[in-house]
Every structure is written in structure tokens, then in C-alpha cells.
Amino acid sequence: MTHGLEPTEEYDGSITVRLLDDESGTEEIRCSSYEDAIDRVKECQHAVTAAKIVAGDGSVVFTSADMDIDDWERVWRREKRRQSVQVEDHDCPHDSVSCFADDLCVQCQIDNVRDEY
């Protein structure tokens, strides 16, 4: 029997923040979570040429040359929340594969507004 809540996510420390500087070279910081990586990028992004977050599989999921860390964090948190919520079934009458009960396609949104009036 466990006491308290079990963590919903586990990281093996394979998330890396890579700081690239034209003068001092590259520095890699291993992080325990994406939250930690985001904080590290926020601390260092203005002191280096570019900052990157690299996932455990080696893919670059964020680079400061392409996007602002605050914008990326909002998208990341929204996607994390969306994946953790139980979503009710929704059959789109317009057969849109990207239409969900909590994130309707544009045509379904238009239908909902039209139905209200």
C-alpha cells in the first residue's frame, strides 16, 4: 500500500537543456523534468546565442531561435492537460479527424453558434 499520491510522470534525467554560445561554446544541463528544463531556459536564454530543450530520444522539442519559451510553455501545458483529461466521445457530423468534444472543428463551432440563435 502506498501513502500519498503516485507521480503521474517520471523522467530518467534524459531531458537536456543545450545552451549554445558563440563565444564559450555549448553547455548541456541534464534536467529532471520538462518544468525544470523550462525554468533553466528562462534563466539562461538571454545570456546565450540559442537555448534548446532536447528530449530523451534526441529530438529537439524547443529552440529559442524558432519560438519564445513562454509561448512554447503554454502550448506544452495545454497539450499535457488535454492528454490527461478524460474526453467524452464525439462523432463529428463533418467527418473531421481533428474534432473532439473539448476541441471542436471550425464547422462544428459554427454549427453550435447557429444552433444557439
Image: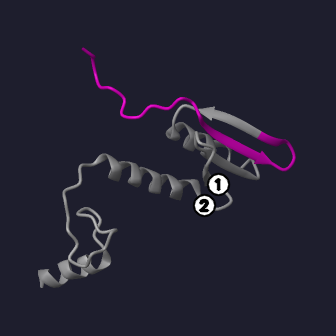
Q: Amino acid at mark 2?
A: Met
> Looking at the image, which residue is at 72% across and 44% down?
19
Secondary-structure class at tag 1: strand
Q: Which residue type does callout 1 highlight?
A: Thr
Query: Is disc 1 surrounded by few (<14), some (14 to 19) or many (20+) residues within 10 Å?
Result: many
Q: Nearer the viewer, residue 100 or 25?
A: 100
User: In terms of secondary structure, where does tag 2 sit?
Assistant: loop
Residue for badge 1: 63
**Residue 106 falls in image quadrant:** bottom left
Horizontal relation, residue 6 to residue 61: left or right: left
In-front residue for pair 28/97: 97
Are there few (<14), some (14-19), or many (20+) residues within 10 Å of tag 2? few
Would you place residue 64 above or below residue 37 in this image? below
Classified by dominant secondary structure, the portion drawn in magenta counts as: loop
Residue 8 on the magenta span: yes
| Span of residues in magenta | 1-26
